[in-house]
Every structure is written in structure tokens, then in C-alpha cells.
Amino acid sequence: MTLLRTVGCLLLGALVALGAVGVHRSLPPWGLLLAVATTLAVPWRLLLSRWPATATAYVVGWAAVFALVVVGRPEGDYALAGDLAGYSLMAAGFVLVIVGVAAVTGSSGRRS
């Protein structure tokens, strides 16, 4: 059951990252606010749950998809622009990594 929960949170993180990249430029500023709020609210809720270590799986899934998007393609296409919206989403990703580290270090003393 724990493995299933972890894989589910990994996939949830990947889907939220894909959705955040997709909507962060739509309907300014609401798309960006929705992307950042969703990106940060899910792991916050996971940290407050009985299984805080699943927040780390969410962060890994989110960061993996986000890293693929930031790198871009050889043709020069990109999905994340170097403007306020793009940098705000990158800042949310940085905060998310800090949350993931906190989940790892904070849950080491707890039992799931």
C-alpha cells in the first residue's frame, strides 16, 4: 500500500507540473496564480497528512517533468519563457524543492 501511495504521489506531481506549465501563461494573472497555488498546496497537504514522506515523491515527480520542460528542445522551442510568469513558476519550483527536503528530514523521526 505504501508503494502504491508513493507511485500515486509521483504521478500526481508529474501531472500537476504538466498542468502548471500549461496554464501559467493563460488568463493573466489567474493562470499563474492557479499554477503556483496548486504546485504548493498539494505537498503542503501531504506534509500535514499521516504520510509526510509522500510529499517527497510528489516533489520528485514535479521536478522531473519541470526539468524536462525547462531544458527545451533542440529545435529551440520552449514552454517556459524568461519573463515574470516563467520566473515565478521557477521560484515556486525552488520552494517546492525546499518542501521536499523538509519532508525527507522531518519524516525521518516519524513512523508511517
Image (cartoon, rainbow, N blue to C red):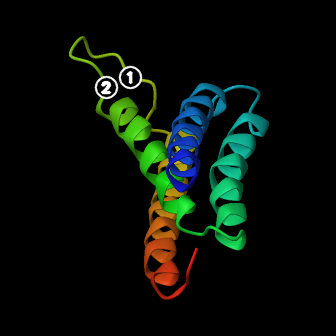
Task: Determine whether, in the image, residue 86 is placed left or right of residue 28.
Answer: left
Q: Give the amino acid at mark 1.
A: Tyr
Task: Determine whether, in the image, residue 69 is placed left or right of residue 102.
Answer: left
Disc 2 and disc 1 in contact, CB within 8 angstroms: yes
Q: Regarding mark 2 in the picture, which secondary structure is present there?
A: loop
Q: Residue at x 34, y 32 (%)?
A: 68
- Residue at the left extreme of this rendering: 74
* Mark 2 to mark 1 CA distance (whole Å): 5 Å
Depth check: give the residue in front, 47 or 7: 7
Q: Regarding mark 1 in the picture, which secondary structure is present there?
A: loop
Q: Residue at x 52, y 67 (%)?
A: 53
Can you say whether 103 is above or below 71 in the image?
A: below
Q: Residue 78: give its label.
A: 1
Place of residue 107 in the rendered image (x, y in percent of width and height, measured from the top left): 51, 79
Q: Residue 37: give its label.
A: none
Place of residue 91 in the rendered image (x, y in percent of width and height, measured from the top left): 50, 56
Place of residue 79 in the rendered image (x, y in percent of width and height, measured from the top left): 45, 25
Q: Which residue is mark 2?
A: 72
Can you say whether 25 is above or below 43 in the image?
A: above
Q: Residues within 10 Å of mark 2 (few under 14, many from 20)?
A: few
Depth check: give the residue in front, 89 or 3: 3
Q: Give the amino acid at mark 2.
A: Gly
Question: Looking at the image, is mark 2 or mark 1 earlier in the sequence?
Answer: 2
Q: Residue at x 64, y 69 (%)?
A: 47
Can you say whether 110 is above or below 7 in the image?
A: below
- Residue at the top extreme of this rendering: 75
Q: Residue at x 51, y 72 (%)?
A: 103
